[in-house]
Image (tube, rainbow, N blue to C red):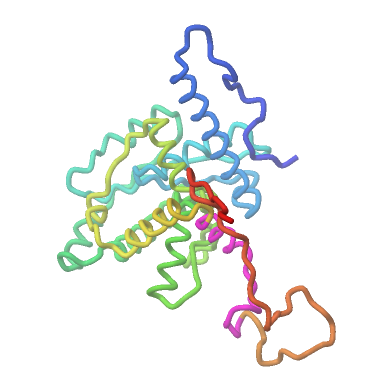
């Protein structure tokens, strides 16, 4: 059986040990539940999109942020119980940002025993020279970083390149493309790179950002902030991500429904003639579940009540 999910018999404390503080036991139990959820969601994405295959060498891109730490950590756990053999190599691109703590990632990666490579390229100076003060640096920075990482993947013989984008990143990208790019487009869980030579995967595709945030606290990852672009508070992506977080608080289930929608596309009910042949659409006389009920009001399930609220019917 091709299972990537966590073992159901993984040791877990179902009852506090003698002398253990109840609060400490609760924290440990919640951490165990979070670990199982992360392993389950990552395993599900890997299997559903065939992200990792027998004999793969997966290059895990490490930025020093919570998401890339979580990605590597969960892949290391799954590597031990996966039904196939694959290798991992962690790669960090040191972009020579002022004050970047060069020792943090090598020390951490050495401590967990994973092979790693640090690539040194001064992209910081290039970005600062070409981008006017106050303008967004992300686009140029990402293009430079992408080209370098593709080269490193070739040099290391990596067959897959794993990135730490999670579910909320994908939804933010969807909204950004809709609001500012005029496209219905998100981040794919698996794609062939623009040079046609690499396969890029996003194993955290089903993982919520709040879970990587919490896991980073549980595991106490040595987080490295991005001083190059992290200080740009008015980025459109930051604003959209904040909107998603606000929706999650006010309307439970909305973000999950949006994520599910990315896997349930109905081309005949959009407007893209390249995906559906509207021009030659004809009545066939055959009933279809996908047919448009043009005169019917669209029905949606009632939203769940907000936590802690009670609906009282009067009369």
Q: Where residue 89 sits: x, y (%)?
A: 47, 41
Q: Where residue 173 sits: x, y (%)?
A: 43, 64
Whether residue 121 is situated above or below residue 278 in the rendered picture: above
Counting every numbered tag in the picture gives 0
Q: Is residue 30 visible?
A: yes
Q: Where residue 202 sits: x, y (%)?
A: 51, 53
Whether residue 116 is situated above or below residue 315 in the rendered picture: above
Q: Which residue occupies the foreground of this view, 80 or 170?
A: 170
Q: Is residue 160 visible?
A: no
- Magenta-tinted stretch: 254-274
Left or right of 83: which side holds 271?
left
Q: Where residue 11 sits: x, y (%)?
A: 60, 21
Please tell me in which quadrant of the rendered image residue 285 appears: bottom right
Left or right of 281: which side holds 123?
left
Give the residue at x 38% y 33%. Answer: 217
User: In the image, is residue 191 part of the stretch drawn in magenta?
Assistant: no
Give the residue at x 54% y 15%. Answer: 16
Give the residue at x 71% y 80%. Answer: 293
Please tell me in which quadrant of the rendered image residue 231 appears: bottom left
């Amino acid at each position: 059986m091709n299972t990537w999910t966590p073992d159901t018999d993984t040791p877990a404390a179902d009852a506090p040990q003698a002398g253990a503080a109840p609060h400490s036991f609760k924290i440990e139990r919640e951490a165990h539940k979070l670990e199982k959820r992360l392993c389950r969601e990552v395993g599900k994405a890997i299997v559903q999109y065939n992200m990792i295959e027998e004999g793969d060498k997966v290059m895990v891109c490490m930025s020093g942020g919570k998401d890339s730490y979580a990605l590597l950590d969960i892949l290391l756990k799954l590597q031990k119980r996966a039904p196939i053999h694959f290798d991992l190599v962690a790669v960090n691109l040191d972009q020579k940002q002022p004050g970047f703590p060069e020792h943090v990632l090598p020390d951490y990666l050495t401590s967990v025993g994973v092979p790693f490579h640090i690539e040194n390229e001064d992209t910081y100076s290039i970005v600062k020279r070409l981008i006017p003060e106050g303008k967004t640096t992300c686009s140029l920075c990402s293009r430079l970083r992408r080209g370098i990482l593709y080269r490193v993947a070739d040099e290391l013989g990596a067959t897959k390149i794993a990135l730490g984008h999670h579910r909320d990143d994908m939804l933010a990208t969807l909204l950004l493309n809709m609001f500012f790019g005029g496209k219905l487009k998100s981040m794919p869980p698996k794609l062939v790179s623009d040079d046609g030579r690499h396969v890029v995967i996003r194993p955290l595709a089903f993982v919520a950002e709040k879970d990587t945030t919490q896991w980073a606290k549980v595991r106490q990852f040595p987080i490295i902030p991005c001083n190059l672009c992290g200080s740009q508070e008015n980025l459109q992506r930051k604003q959209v991500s904040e909107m998603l977080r606000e929706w999650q608080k006010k309307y439970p289930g909305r973000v999950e429904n949006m994520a599910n929608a990315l896997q349930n596309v109905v081309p005949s009910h959009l407007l893209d003639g390249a995906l559906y042949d509207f021009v030659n659409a004809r009545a066939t006389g055959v009933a279809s579940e996908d047919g448009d009920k043009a005169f019917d009001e669209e029905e949606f399930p009632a939203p769940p009540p907000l936590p802690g609220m009670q609906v009282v019917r009067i009369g």
